[in-house]
Image (cartoon, grey):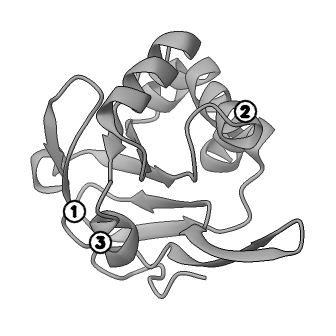
Amino acid sequence: MTALKTGDKAPDFTGKDQKGNEISLTSLKGNKVVLYFYPKDDTPGCTAQACSLRDNYEALISAGYRVIGVSPDSEKSHVKFAEKYDLPFPLLADTDKKIANDYGVWGRKKFMGKEYDGVIRTTVIIDAEGVISEVIEKVDTKNHANQILG
């Protein structure tokens, strides 16, 4: 799906999270980053994925990861989603789809026989130097943290 692959330099990004904080890849340099792209707040698959990361958040932090979610939903939508499920990590509002396009995860999808453009669920693991160390295209929403932690 994504044109980016292991060994590529991760595109820099800047976005606002659900608390209005601006977050960029540059500001996270020196940290390993789990940048996960998901289609929509408060839908079954996206909720399962977010809750898997929430439930294993301490293990991810202990392994040195910073977790950042990205979807085209608004900051307001992210606030409701994060509060409803007590999500401890930032969710970036990519309303103009710039980050999704830069990472190659915005594209043609099929659901129930209909085709449309949307976020192709993908997680990009970025090392402390800003290089992609893994791209997870087949996301297991219920066990996503285990896919990351191995």
Q: Residue furthest bottom?
A: 3
- Measuring from the top left, give residue 34's x and y in whole percent: 44, 48
Judge the density around disc 3: few (<14), some (14-19), many (≥20) Cα neighbours within 10 Å.
Answer: many
Left/right placement of residue 52 relative to residue 86 reads right
The residue under label 3 is 10
Quarter of the view holding residue 110: bottom right
Q: Amino acid at mark 3?
A: Ala
Horizontal and vertical percent position of residue 66: 35, 37
Q: Mark 2 or mark 3: which is in front?
A: 2
Residue for point 35% across, 40% down: 74
For label 1, the residue is 129
SS at circle 2:
helix
Q: Nearer the viewer, mark 3 or mark 1?
A: 3
The number of discs equals 3
Q: Position of residue 98 (x, y in %)?
A: 28, 68
Badge 2 is on which residue?
48
| Residue 21 drawn above or below residue 129 | above
Residue type marked 2: Ala
| Residue drawn at the location 27% of the way across and 78% of the way down | 9
Is disc 2 surrounded by few (<14), some (14 to 19) or many (20+) residues within 10 Å? some
Residue 138 vs 95, above or below: the answer is below
Residues 72 and 149: in front is 72
* Mark 1 crowdedness (10 Å alpha carbons): few <14, some 14-19, many ≥20: some
| Depth order, front residue of 17/112 | 112
N-terminal-most mark, 3 or 1: 3
Q: Upstream in the sequence, badge 2 or badge 3?
A: 3
Secondary structure type for disc 3: loop
Q: Amino acid at mark 1?
A: Glu
Q: Along the polypeptide, which appears first: circle 1 or circle 2?
A: 2
Q: Does dot 1 land on a helix, a strand or a loop? A: loop
Q: Residue at x 32, y 54 (%)?
A: 95
